[in-house]
Amino acid sequence: MNATVRDIMTPQVVTVRRDTSFKELAVLLGTSRVSAFPVTDEAGRLIGVVSEADMLIKEVDHAIHPGLFTGLRRSGEHEKAVGLTAADMMTPAPVTIGPEEPVDRAAFLMYDHGVKRLPVVDAAGHLAGIVSRADVLSVFARPDEEILRDVSQGLLLRGFSVAPGHLEITVADGIVTLAGRPDTDELGHQIVEAARHVDGVVAVEDRMFYSGLRSPAEP
């Protein structure tokens, strides 16, 4: 019911070594159709990431008069501009995530750090894959029928021991609508909150009847 990073990541990743030359990186950008390369050591452990943005600095350095490049030099990016290998240009200690982490954790890290992708590493630091923003958003492409099954069977029946049919559940375009009268107000609110975290759910419409509230059928 809750996808992990392993479920959505790309396991086959184009990687480079610290001594990969700028020329080789430029060729790989064109042939591999990716915008960044994890940099690994001889044991396959992640040591950094070099992106097309890192490499673009070299072209900027060539194009702009040195006197106008002061801010870039001051920020430390001039070192990348004169770099010759992946180790010279990479971002060391990049933000990473484990393969068993939930997808929403990956989304939070991407948003919080402003990155487009996350290297996926195991407990020993070895690269296991990579997950992109598109991968994270792919959970919202789940069919409504699958979401309905997860909410009715996985969430209500197994999670809250609520018998099928006790509440009315519909799903349209990823929007879950819950109707009926829960056994307690607290249970109803817990179900609504839990439903928001089911993979593929865009929103939850709470139309359940709570204590002190009239049914729409009542005058």
Image (cartoon, rainbow, N blue to C red):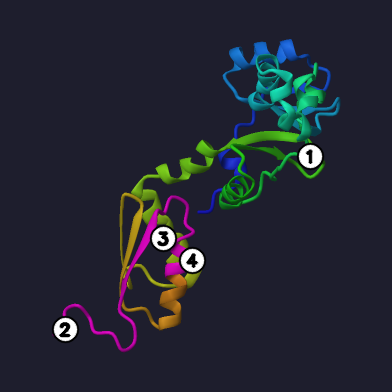
Q: Residue at x 59, y 13 (%)?
A: 30
**Which residue corresponds to mark 4?**
158
**Which residue corresponds to mark 3?**
151
Q: Earlier in the sequence, mark 4 or mark 1?
A: 1
From the image, state whether disc 2 or disc 4 is nearer to you: 2
From the image, state whether disc 2 or disc 1 is nearer to you: 1
Position in image of residue 192 (x %, y %):
42, 68
**Which residue corresponds to mark 1?**
93
Q: Earlier in the sequence, mark 2 or mark 1?
A: 1
| Observer-nearest of 106 and 9 | 106
Q: Earlier in the sequence, mark 3 or mark 4?
A: 3
Q: Residue at x 46, y 68 (%)?
A: 193
Main SS of residues in magenta: loop
Amino acid on which the number 3 mark rests in the picture: Val
* Distance between the alpha carbons at the discs numbered 1 and 3: 39 Å
Q: Is residue 125 above or below residue 162?
A: above
From the image, state whether disc 3 or disc 2 is nearer to you: 2
Q: Residue furthest bottom?
A: 212
* Distance between the alpha carbons at the discs numbered 4 and 1: 41 Å
Q: Which residues are magenta?
A: 192-219
Q: Quadrant of residue 183?
A: bottom left
Residue count near mark 4 (Cα–Cα under 10 Å), binned few <14, some 14–19, many ≥20 = few
Q: Determine whether label 4 and label 1 are within 8 Å by CB.
A: no
* Distance between the alpha carbons at the discs numbered 3 and 4: 10 Å
**Which residue corresponds to mark 2?**
218
* Distance between the alpha carbons at the discs numbered 3 and 2: 28 Å
Secondary structure under the numbered disc 2 in the rendered image: loop
| Observer-nearest of 175 and 60 | 60
Q: Quadrant of residue 16?
A: top right
Q: Earlier in the sequence, mark 2 or mark 4?
A: 4
